[in-house]
Image (spheres, coloured by chain):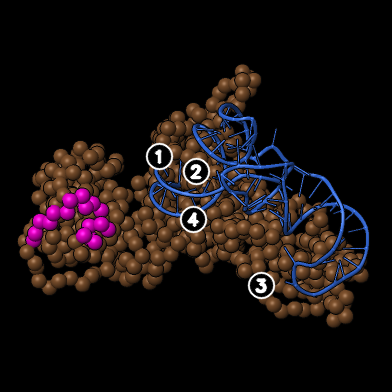
Chain colours: A brown, B blue
Amino acid sequence: MRYTKLFGKTLKADKEFDTKGVEYLIRGGFIDQVMAGAYTFLPLGVRVLHKIEQIVREEMDKIGVELLMPSIVPTEYWKRTNRFDSVDVLFKVVGANEGSLKKNDAEYVLNPTHEDVITPTAKKFNFSYKDLPFAVYQIQTKFRNEERPKTGLLRTREFRMKDLYSFHKSVEDLKAFYEVAREAYIQVYNRLGLGDQTYYTAASGGDFTEEYSHEFQTRLETGEDLIFRVKSNNQCFNKEIAPSKAVALEQDSEMKPMEEVLGKGIIGVDELSKFMGIKPSQTTKTLIFESEKGILVASVRGDYDVNELKLKKVAGVKELKLASDETVEKVTGAKVGYAGIVNLPNDVEVFIDDSIEPLINFETGGNRTDYHLANVNWGRDLQKPKKFHDLKVAKSGDLYPETSEEYEAFKASEVGNIFPLMTKFTDAVDYQFVDADGKSKPVYMGSYGIGTSRLLGVIAEKFHDDKGMIWPESVAPYKVHLIALGENAQEEGLKIYETLTKAGVEVMWDDRGGASAGEKFNDADLIGLPYRIVVSQKSLEKGGYEVKKRTGEEIKYLNLNSLIELTSR
RNA sequence: CGGGGAGUAGUUCAGUUGGCUAGAAUGCUGCGUUUGGGACGCAGAGGUCGCAGGUUCAAGUCCUGUCUCCCCGACCA
């Protein structure tokens, strides 16, 4: 490709960008923002995207077959699975004007994912045990009505995703395939150069499943997720489910007398701990929840938050929401903000986090408006519960309960996920198979996603220096950036360009006549192709064509044959 | 969903208490000089000041509404 024929231009840095990765993608002419959360992939960017998707495709072809489903489907598909009203990122498409509506006023869903479409499709073709298992995938554009798109391609309203769906006769078969998919994913990240930075991470199953799902998380300062890694066995947990044990803090050796403290209007841990002159970790935070089984009370140490997913599991409930003000007042006998664990009614179930167990002389709400209790102690002021639980949102510095070792906590971006869906969707569309024994049985299903446009964003965040991108060879838009300096060298430049291109090397030749040497060098660094070749009077005098890898400073002078040999590998 | 900032040339921005033909830098076009790290001279093109309404002799500037973008937090399959 000749640079002058390329659509899109490099830009000077004349404003601040979210991150370096975003800066280089935009300034290098890879992407162009159309609106919040939607980008045009310019020719350079679309080449990278296609290379990423081709790697994904090659690995997926080993475990499934490719198809392509429509982006728009009748709303019926989503109503059938009961997700039309509940998925809060769903887009709907309707005719835009009178003329269009007159022709067809139907409403469609713009798909954010395709479980709801593939399942009824699979049901049409595969109903015998002889057809199972099978796996299909697609690489397609998805739409999600995100509240706040951010950080370039990391979170957008329109994005590219590979989604794979597998169907099985049994849970065992599904679980076996789950491991196969995991291996395929690891191959993908290895080929993209992200392997050593990407972690297989346990996460919540979300709407999909009550069990955990798994995510692949790439370590990234600007990522949105917080990951807790057990260093001794490399096990990783997403913050949303990470089991955690608080570090033991120094406590008083003697119990002080309990006292009721008047703190008019003092609500919230920060304000309260300042008011009482104690550390937040010496206070407790008590929240009242309503569930389908009734009212629940949960309490964690003041420097923690309640993890609702953990509480749901411990309490064995499916629905959980913070109680209304009226309910709180009824349960605690006080206005909101003064709930505590001493003297609660007997008929509410109380769950207490294990971070509170070792505390001596701690604070808890007074269950009386404007009052707090200070110097509360187990055994004397209230009975120890039969069991303490882990109800807290893990934070940096916490310990892994199994081994009591400190987690390594780091920020990361989710680059893939795998869900054991079990029969959630197959049940919804009444999809069963006839087994060898002639009986109908449920079909088990799994779903596996990789965000390919987000991967492009993640790679941009990982592979750059202070001058620009440094693309891994596997996804670089071109392999060689060719620069010819000075009038005399242009003919040589053309010769190299044509020879290398003929040899099958992807070359981009900066054939601009007016651009200065400095401009060309800077653009080459910004665009970040793996090899830079310079031809000039100087290089010819030194014995040929100058070659420098983007990753290093070493410069070699080669003849044309050696160039081909080096770059066509 | 809560809080904050901003829409003026392709881009990044300036534009004072309302007042002459709306500016700069950069980018772009032409001519010329340059050519190993974003060179220089000269000439030029480029704007419905986000949109709608209002106040006024007069609105980029004041008022109302609206749309959009950006940032922080919450949420997130």
Disc 4 marks a residue whose amino acid type is Glu
Q: CA distance from mark 2 to mark 3?
A: 37 Å
Label 1 environment density (alpha carbons within 10 Å; few <14, some 14–19, many ≥20): some
Q: What chain does badge 1 belong to?
A: A
Is disc 4 placed on a helix, strand or loop?
strand
Direction from residue B19 to residue A349 in the image, left or right: left
Q: CA distance from mark 2 to mark 1?
A: 25 Å
Direction from residue A65 to residue A559 in the image, left or right: right
Residue B70, position in %: x, y?
54, 50
Q: Dividing the picture into quarters, in which one does residue A295 lie?
A: top left
Vertical side of A28 occupied by A541: above or below = below
What is the quadrant of the C terminus of chain A in the image? bottom right
Q: CA distance from mark 4 to mark 1?
A: 24 Å
State the mark number for residue A335: none
Report if residue A173 is visible in the image: no
Q: Earlier in the sequence, mark 3 or mark 4?
A: 4
Q: Which residue is mark 1?
A: A424
Is disc 1 placed on a helix, strand or loop?
helix
Kindly indicate whether the residues beneath marks 1 and 3 are on one polypeptide chain: yes
